[in-house]
């Protein structure tokens, strides 16, 4: 009989003490049938994209395609590009890359860690409750934060992702999972009872902290309950050729990064098509790995600190063009793959590409490389916003539009002051 370590079991379930989604924040019904889009995908290169090769020099529909976006030319009508979107108040340095989907830094929210809650995780709570996985976090460059302010782990192993999505556990392992869920529910009951007795001895300030802990316990209980509900529901049956190659036994699929990028994108398409999840966040890692491409002689991090040297920029362009080409292939797959209603997945999925790093060479968090498309949003244009001092237009204004496009009646998120509906809907 297969044995599981409880700590690893809970980590695999993604169970952590996290603040719950408060009802007062949920103004909209979940997964509204009237929503223009049903799904959300975010792709984020940790070090962003070289600004000189990413941003068009002119605005409107007739902009000249910049170097790094040439692989995306066939999707020009589907994508909107923005210049001068960023997060007001976020400083520079490598840490800014993890602020992409929440617009705040850890140091600024010590007393309110729930402010670190990211766009994708909010959507997981709202449009991800009818799927096995409320959200799927892939790659190495994680940018997702829980409601409790915990940075969430990602999975970069395509074989492991495939197994998680499509391979059913053995009856023995399923029974052990049920036992763990029952036991952990009992443990939480004891914790709650002890906390209730402790509450009588605390000052008001500490009672508030304890109340936050208790609400977090209730969130864990909901996660355990959700896991229990899905144990006996069979996973979709999908061919494993996406990770092992075609029908030819001699075909070998390279599952090592960066060559596995196309495999991960294929898994994302299948996950959406099979309704395994409605929310995916895929991060490309930073680090100083040496990309195994012709013409590359230095590590990735070293190349991003190019100082505008032509030789280093030439090598960095090879890597970033690869990212753009793989993203283009993903959009093509979404166009060619129908959802359950017969429309293409791209028509029903909002796709966001971007990073919390604006210029890796100077560690700047200003003027982030942002593209959005799909999900019924208007595309084909490049929009440039004015800068006021250090800050451009709040990226969170775009997030409000994305939330509304996905059926959430929400008019604010993080540092937003408005929305971009006039440009996209």
Image (cartoon, rainbow, N blue to C red):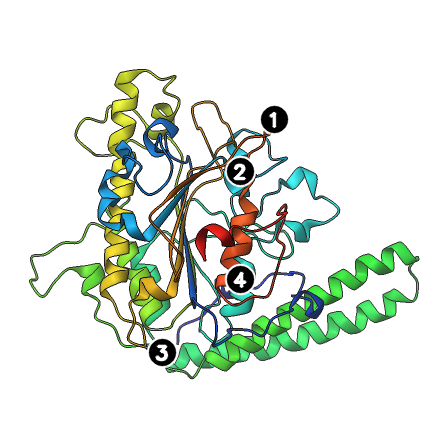
**Horizontal and vertical percent for residue 272?**
35, 67
* Front tag of 3 and 4: 4
Q: Nearer the viewer, residue 247 or 97?
A: 97
Q: Nearer the viewer, residue 278 or 246?
A: 278
> Eyeballing the image, is 286 above or below 194?
above
Q: Residue at x 74, y 69 (%)?
A: 191
Question: Contact (CB < 8 A) between labels 1 and 4?
Answer: no
Element type where label 2 sits in the image = strand
Element type where label 4 sits in the image = helix
* Front tag of 1 and 3: 1
Q: CA distance from mark 2 to mark 4?
A: 20 Å
Q: Which residue is mark 1?
A: 389
Image quarter where the C terminus lies is bottom left
**Horizontal and vertical percent for residue 317?**
27, 30
Q: Which residue is mark 2?
A: 86
Q: Which residue is mark 4?
A: 404
Image mark for residue 170:
3
- The answer to which of marks 2 and 1 sits earlier in the sequence is 2
Q: Residues within 10 Å of mark 3 (few under 14, many from 20)?
A: few
In the picture provided, is 37 more to the left or to the right than 388? left
Question: Contact (CB < 8 A) between labels 3 and 2?
Answer: no
């Amino acid at each position: 009989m297969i044995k599981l370590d409880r700590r690893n079991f809970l980590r695999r379930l993604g169970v952590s003490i996290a603040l719950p989604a408060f009802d007062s924040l949920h103004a909209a019904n979940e997964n509204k049938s009237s929503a223009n889009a049903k799904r959300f995908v975010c792709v984020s290169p940790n070090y962003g994209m070289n600004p000189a090769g990413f941003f068009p020099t002119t605005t409107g529909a007739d902009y000249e395609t910049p170097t790094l976006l040439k692989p995306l030319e066939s999707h020009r009508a589907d994508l909107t590009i923005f210049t001068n979107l960023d997060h007001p108040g976020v400083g520079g340095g490598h840490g800014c890359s993890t602020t992409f989907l929440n617009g705040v830094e850890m140091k600024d929210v010590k007393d309110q860690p729930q402010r670190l809650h990211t766009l994708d995780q909010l959507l997981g709570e709202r449009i991800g409750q009818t799927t096995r996985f409320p959200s799927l976090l892939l790659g190495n460059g994680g940018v997702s934060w829980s409601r409790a302010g915990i940075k969430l782990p990602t999975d970069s192993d395509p074989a492991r992702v495939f197994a998680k999505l499509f391979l059913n556990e053995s009856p023995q392992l399923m029974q052990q999972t049920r036992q763990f869920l029952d036991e952990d529910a009992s443990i939480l009951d004891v914790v709650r009872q002890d906390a209730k007795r402790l509450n009588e001895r605390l000052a008001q300030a500490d009672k508030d902290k304890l109340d936050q802990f208790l609400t977090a316990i209730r969130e864990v209980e909901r996660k355990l309950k959700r896991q229990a509900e899905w144990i006996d529901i069979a996973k979709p049956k999908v061919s494993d050729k996406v990770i092992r190659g075609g029908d030819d036994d001699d075909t070998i699929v390279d599952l090592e990064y960066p060559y596995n990028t196309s495999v991960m994108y294929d898994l994302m398409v299948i996950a959406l098509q099979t309704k395994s999840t409605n929310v995916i966040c895929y991060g490309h890692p930073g680090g100083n790995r040496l990309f195994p491409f012709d013409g590359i002689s230095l590590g990735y991090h070293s190349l991003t600190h190019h100082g505008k040297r032509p030789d280093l920029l030439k090598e960095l362009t090879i890597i970033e063009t690869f990212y753009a080409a793989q993203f283009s292939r993903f959009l093509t797959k979404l166009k060619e793959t129908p959802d359950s209603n017969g429309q293409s997945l791209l028509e029903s999925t909002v796709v966001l590409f971007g990073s919390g790093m604006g210029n890796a060479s100077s560690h700047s968090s200003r003027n982030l490389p942002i593209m959005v498309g799909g999900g019924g949003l208007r595309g084909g244009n490049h929009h440039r916003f004015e800068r006021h001092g250090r800050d451009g237009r709040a990226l969170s204004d775009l997030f409000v539009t994305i939330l509304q496009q996905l059926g959430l009646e929400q008019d604010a998120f993080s540092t937003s002051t408005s929305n971009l509906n006039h440009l996209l809907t």
